Amino acid sequence: MEKSSLFQIKRDIETCIGQKIQLKANKGRKKAFIKEGILENTYPSIFVVKFENDYEATRRVSYSYTDILTKAVEIVICKDNKKIQVS
């Protein structure tokens, strides 16, 4: 069951490459990182999100599909002002 869930998460994320997303990552101790970025690429075990800040600096962060499965990371796809939850 878990392997098919990871495959489904990976497939859902692959269809959204290049789209704007909102990412929420739990940092522990009731702290959360919420930022909008672009889903840049997917790999067999991870996906990469590109964030840009006010200082024209680009930051690329990678997360694993297991992070989504364990709910350490939540992704919402922003498409036509409609947010679609990847589950």
Image: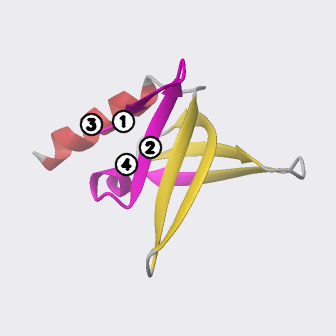
> How far separated are the C-alphas under marks 3 and 2?
16 Å
Q: Please name the residue that numbered disc 1 is placed on.
A: 85
Residue 11: x and y in percent read 34, 29
Residue range highlighted in magenta: 62-87
Q: Are marks 1 and 2 in contact (CB under 8 Å)?
A: yes
> How far separated are the C-alphas under marks 2 and 4?
11 Å
Q: Is residue 63 left or right of residue 86?
A: right
Q: Tell me the quadrant of the picture where the C terminus can be found.
A: top left
Q: Amino acid at mark 4?
A: Tyr
> How far separated are the C-alphas under marks 3 and 1?
16 Å
Q: Amino acid at mark 1?
A: Gln
> How far separated are the C-alphas under marks 1 and 4?
14 Å
Identity of the residue furthest to the top in this view: 80
Q: Are marks 1 and 4 in contact (CB under 8 Å)?
A: no
In the rendered structure, find residue 75 and report the number of the disc placed on it: 2
Mark closer to the observer (1, 4): 1
Assign a secondary structure to mark 4: helix
Residue 34: x and y in percent read 56, 55
Query: For the residue carrying disc 1, how many other residues have a C-alpha within 10 Å: few (<14), some (14-19), or many (20+)?
Result: few
Q: Please name the residue that numbered disc 4 is placed on.
A: 65
Residue 61: x and y in percent read 62, 53
Assign a secondary structure to mark 1: strand
Assign a secondary structure to mark 2: strand
Mark toward the start of the polypeptide (2 vs 4):
4
- Disc tally is 4
Q: Which color scheme does this rendered protein use?
A: secondary structure
Q: Is residue 69 left or right of residue 46?
A: left
Q: Residue at x 33, y 54 (%)?
A: 66
